[in-house]
Amino acid sequence: EIVMTQSPLSLSVTPGQPASISCKSSQSLLRSDGKTYLYWYLQRPGQSPQLIISEVSSRFSGVPDRFSGSGSGTDFTLKISRVEAEDVGIYYCMEGKYDWTFGQGTKVEIK
Amino acid sequence: QVQLVQSGAEVRKPGSSVKVSCKASAGTFNSYPISWVRQAPGQGLEWMGGIVPVFGRADYAPKFQGRVTITADASTSTAYMEMSNLTSDNTAVYYCVRGLDFWGQGTPVTVSS
């Protein structure tokens, strides 16, 4: 069973400041096709989750470029260069190499 | 733009079953996987299983194997998730997801005597 571990579990950020979330998987997410199956979702309050980053670093359609993803193998990071009020919510990493396993979530709020 | 419209909130008694539907409003239905994810109150996201309608065979997370049945009807572009022998632990919002990027609005299921 694969385990996805996020840190921190909560983050309070001043608008305009950067934020960073770490996600570690218990097994490598690199598949034989050369792709790494790590995704990031944002769940805003009262809404369904929405995809923001796919395959480690590809921003989904319409996602602002202040969001970026990086990492490889088992260690991954989501960065927001300048947090805005609309970025509030819970961020989940998810592995898609095996089945789908989500991290515990990181709650981001504005100071 | 694909939209996934799920059936409405359900209230069930322990030991009963529930069937949630997920209808795709547009776009290709058959060839994309449809997954089901649940979220217990105040908790995170948990994958339950999924199906690729054109193949018809569903895969399940081990903890749901035997208690959840996922099916799809290509003629109506609708996927279903049925859960049996409900307990209060199954109280959650259940989401369908097409591929990785299109999520339904969620269906709250409450299990209470």
Image: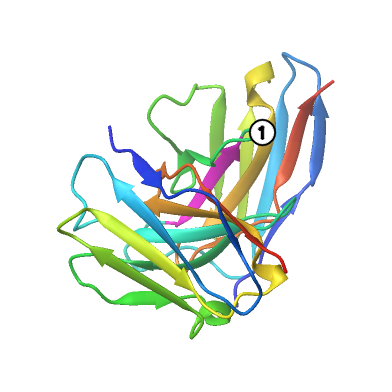
**Tally of numbered tags:** 1
Image quarter hosting the N terminus of chain A: bottom right
Q: Is residue A41 magenta?
A: yes
Q: Amino acid at mark 1?
A: Pro
Image quarter hosting the C terminus of chain A: top right
Q: Residue furthest left?
A: B75
Q: Residue furthest top?
A: A16
Residue at left offset 34%, top offset 75%? B58
Residue at left offset 21%, top offset 52%? B29
Q: Chain of mark 1?
A: A
Find disc 1 in the rendering and name its residue: A45
Looking at the image, residue B70 sits to the left or right of residue A83; the answer is left
Write down the region rendered in magenta: A36-43
Instruction: From the viewer's side, name the closer residue of B88 and B38.
Output: B88
x, y percentage for residue A25?
Answer: 62, 63
x, y percentage for residue A90?
Answer: 68, 40
Q: Is residue A47 above or below residue B19?
A: above
Instruction: From the viewer's side, name the closer residue of B32 and A1.
Output: B32
